[in-house]
Image (cartoon, rainbow, N blue to C red):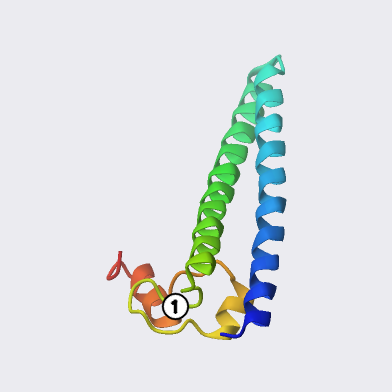
Amino acid sequence: MDKKRLEIYKKRLLERRSELLETVSKTEQDGRQADEEAARDLADKASSSYTKEFLFKKSNDDRFILQLIQEALDRLDEGNYGTCVACGGEIQQKRLDAVPWARHCIECQEKQEQGILE
């Protein structure tokens, strides 16, 4: 992969990481506020509980993507970005354009989703 394309991916990864860090921070703050709000009746308590669960799930998903982004940035620094971590084959450019933190080529990603690949 040429240097120009690598720089484009690096920029996109850094931008996405920044966005997610901001989102995670806001989500944590919103979760704390939901904790602090005094629930007046059972419906308020249920609503508050649902909100906290929703924010917790969103935060976990965002943290996982942050981890994948950091791994992609590490692969960029190591010089093996765009290479499938499972089979060593090249990850398709269209896939990297859509998901720049992708770890697997499409074939290995399908295997992972089927539970064949860890």
Q: Give the percent coordinates (x, y) of residue 78.
A: 47, 67
The residue under label 1 is 83
Q: Which residue lies furthest to the left in this view?
A: 116
In the rendered image, which quarter contains the C terminus?
bottom left
Q: In this view, does 84 lie to the left or right of 95?
A: left
In the rendered image, which quarter contains the N terminus?
bottom right
Q: Give the percent coordinates (x, y) of residue 34.
A: 68, 25
Circle 1 — which element? loop
Q: What residue type is labelled 1?
A: Thr
Q: Is residue 108 left or right of residue 74?
A: left
Q: Which of the two residues, 92 or 61, is positioned nearer the viewer here?
A: 92
Q: In this view, does 10 lie to the left or right of 84?
A: right
Q: Give the percent coordinates (x, y) of residue 85.
A: 38, 71
**Is the residue 77 above or below the residue 111 in the image?**
above
**Is the residue 112 above or below the residue 40 in the image?**
below
Which picture quadrant has residue 43?
Answer: top right
**Is the residue 5 above or below the residue 30 in the image?**
below
Which picture quadrant has residue 107?
Answer: bottom left
Q: Which residue is drawn at 67% across and 50% down?
A: 20
Q: Crowding at label 1, few (<14), some or many (≥20) Cα neighbours within 10 Å?
A: some
Q: Residue at x 72, y 59 (%)?
A: 15
**Is the residue 82 above or below the residue 18 in the image?**
below
Q: Which of the two residues, 4 or 95, is positioned nearer the viewer here?
A: 4
Q: Residue at x 51, y 58 (%)?
A: 68
Q: Which of the two residues, 38 or 109, is positioned nearer the viewer here?
A: 109
Q: Which residue is drawn at 70% across and 51% down?
A: 18
